[in-house]
Amino acid sequence: MVLNESDHLLRSLLLSACLGALIGLERQWDEQFRHHRSKVLAGLRTFTLWAIFGVLCAWFTQTVHPLFFIAGFLAMGVWLTFFLQNRNRLGGDPGFTTGAAGMISFLIGGLVFWGQERVSLVLAVSVIILLAIKPSVHRFTRGITLEDVRTALKFAAVTGVILPLVPDHPHGPYGAFNPHTVWMMVVLVSGIGFSGYVAVRLLGQRNGIALTGLLGGIVSSTATTLSMSRQSHERPMESRDCSLAILLACSIMPLRVGMLLAIVNIRLLGTVWCPLVAVSLPGAIWCLWRLFRGGADSGRTPDLTPYGNPLRLRVAFQFGILYALIVFVVKASIVKLGAKGVFWISGLSGLIDLDAITLSLSQMTVTGNLGSHVTMSAILIAIFANTALKVIVAAFFGSPALFREVGTVLGITSAVVSVLFVFYAH
């Protein structure tokens, strides 16, 4: 059904008014209930009018003059500037955030009139969320340290400065060394670690053992296993909570592997998602049972070893060297030994670093050097080796109670990995 000009204008006015009212409702609630102010700078009615104003200016641009919308935007900006400056002179809160939200409401009205309803809806919801999380943002910024700033700057350097300058050409024997690909993998893994680091800084480490395990699976499940095992040995009464953190991290680990594989080669997703979910199931089922069942010590949260800066450049270079070495060895193994050589390398690499072999094999499926089933089999071998290493860590560094739980669940996980490998190997 094609709408005529009047129907389109009325529909645009109605939709923009609703979106403006939602933004204004958040602003009015914030002023009245969060800050306990009787006078509101701009609330539901004002934002509704601003959004309608944007629609009308867009309509007049189409019917009267092509610069009408720009003139209306400038007029609104000048009016808001004088109004906020006068409010600032009186010593009150100038309300710059509300003024900026008002300008965006005007633009949302224009987007609605020009047929960008989906974009305007996403923009309005995003603005509402950004305005509503003000307390969380303030708490986060008050907790920012010099180390956090350095971490963010290092991540910006690794991503935005070094990566564009690295040459994108294969070098060396078998064409195994591509500097751009190697550094891209460093950026990818560093980005995952940086995201986990920001989440820890934003939410805090003492918001529950479940959060700790989940973030541990994102940052490093092996490091989480070592840290929690040591803690259970020092404080045996916290063994059950420590084992919960370890098994949550181990349940997230296969999903993280699948995410890395899919990011490098999205076509692998259809092959990898089912076996990797199956590998996660034993730990996930046990963790859900523990969380719902509770226990005498379920409410305790151990003192957690803080995650350090995940972007130490030395560590980034070490990972890049390890990744390049694994790519070279895997390609050489394919030439010399065939698929069986890749399996041996996967097992050894899984003991050292699971991400490096995952990214190496995934990249090689893109170039056609490996088939998806061979890649999946090699990944399963690496997961098996990594899981066995965690059992050994729990046995040597953890308390007997922790080892019983972790060893049992990871033993079942290893059995699942073995069955899947037999299936994919054929």
Image (spheres, grey):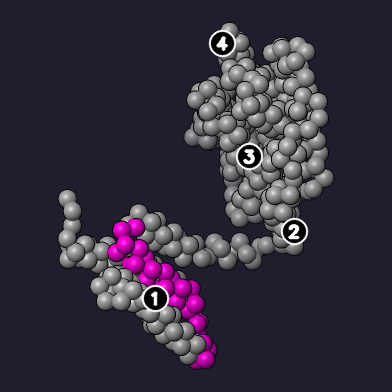
Left or right placement of residue 365 versus residue 345 in this view: left
Tag 1 or tag 2, which sits nearer the N-term?
Answer: 1
The residue that label 4 is drawn on is: 423
Q: Secondary structure at mark 2?
A: helix
Q: Amino acid at mark 1?
A: Ile
The answer to whether residue 224 of the structure is visible from this angle is no
Numbered range of the magenta stretch: 87-116
Q: In percent of the image, x 28 and y 67: which residue is there?
A: 17
- Residue 70: image tag: 1
Cα separation, mark 3 vs mark 2, equals 21 Å
Cα separation, mark 1 vs mark 4, equals 64 Å
Q: In percent of the image, x 81 and y 30: which residue is there?
A: 172
Categorize mark 2 by other alpha carbons within 10 Å: few (<14), some (14-19), many (20+).
some
The residue that label 3 is drawn on is: 218
Tag 4 or tag 1, which sits nearer the N-term?
Answer: 1
Tag 2 or tag 4, which sits nearer the N-term?
Answer: 2
The residue that label 2 is drawn on is: 150
Q: Secondary structure at mark 3?
A: helix
Q: Amino acid at mark 4?
A: Phe
Asked if labels 2 and 3 touch by Cβ distance under 8 angstroms, the answer is no
